[in-house]
Image: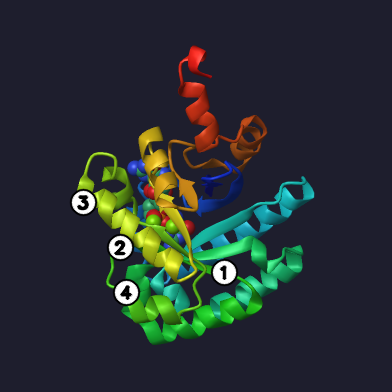
Amino acid sequence: MYYQPQIAIATGEVVGVEALLRWRHPRRGMVDPEELIRVAEQSAVMRLLTRRVVDDVVEQLAQWSAAGITLRAALNVSVRDLHTGEIVDQIADRLARYGVRPQRLQLEITEGALMADPRRVLATISRLHAIGVAIALDDFGTGYSSMQHLRRLPLSEVKVDRSFVLGMADDADDAAIVRSMIDLAGALGLRVVAEGVEDERTWRLLHAAGCDVAQGWFYARPMPAGELTAWLARYRPLRPAAREAESRPPQAR
Ligand code: C2E
Ligand code: MG
Ligand code: MG
């Protein structure tokens, strides 16, 4: 697993990480995660993969705790993982076994997965919500979730898809879409995370639009857990206001 930091835009504080699957094939090298997931989803392999991801991430959270690092970790699940309650039992078991508080774990579900079978998915995420594991709606804007779902599902967070965020500094339409999504999510009381924040300009626009959290190469790429510890030790919070003062010419300070 690789982990990518998520930063509260207003304070610069690291609020969590997203766990992202990486597979280094002995001959083919790094395999594109999206391709890997697409193939795994066709078979029982996906279930096994997700079990492994849950095990690894909960164990990692326990190790961070022991080292005095309190982070929330989000992991991605695919639609079939949510068709039975098995994943809830596994998560509850691992959290108890490692002594990790449920609030430290979050699950990301794509809009597409949610809509593929809203009824069954709702049953599973309601159980997760009941044990204290928060749910994020991933790739927001790419699927077709109705406003009804946004309102009724026990969601804590929406993640604005990177396809909109990547374009927002240059494309007025993308910027307008992102702002609308931030407003909508905010009005519904959901935390908003922008993924794919690659540059300072985008980060400033997101701050101005009232986005809560940012994730992207501007801060850090996904990295192995060992590197993350060193990154956290080096990290200095970057606040939009502080940065503005720094970038003014010296005589104006
Ligand atoms: P996602 O959940 O939307 O994850 C965010 C993706 O954006 C990650 O791609 C991440 O590396 C990439 N990203 C982050 N910051 C930036 C940025 O500033 N610029 C750009 N261009 N990209 C950025 P990644 O790691 O290739 O994963 C792709 C997708 O594969 C994920 O999208 C997720 O849907 C799926 N995936 C990854 N790991 C898992 C897993 O453990 N289980 C499941 N079911 N799906 C996974
Ligand atoms: Mg995700
Ligand atoms: Mg996403």
Does the residue tagged 3 have its C-beta within 8 Å of any atom of ligand 1? no
Residue 134 sits above or below residue 235 on the image? below
Residue furthest to the top in view is 251
Cα separation between marks 1 and 2: 20 Å
Residue at 33%, 61% in the rendered image = 39
| Percent position of residue 134, x then y | 57, 69
Q: In the rendered view, does 184 fall on the left or right side of 213?
A: left
Residue bearing mark 2? 141
Element carrying mark 1: strand
Whichever of callouts 1 and 2 sits on the residue coming sooner in the sequence is: 1
Local packing at callout 3 (Cα closer than 10 Å; few below 14, some 14-19, many 20+) is: few
Query: Comparing marks 3 and 1, which lies closer to the viewer?
Result: 3
| Percent position of residue 68, x then y | 77, 46
Amino acid of disc 4 = Ser
Residue bearing mark 1? 134
Residue placed most toward the observer, 69 or 247:
247
Residue at 53%, 82% in the rendered image = 126
Cα separation between marks 2 and 3: 13 Å
Amino acid of disc 2 = Gly
Residue bearing mark 4? 145
Cα separation between marks 4 and 3: 20 Å
Residue placed most toward the observer, 40 or 139:
139
- Label 4–label 3 contact, CB within 8 A: no
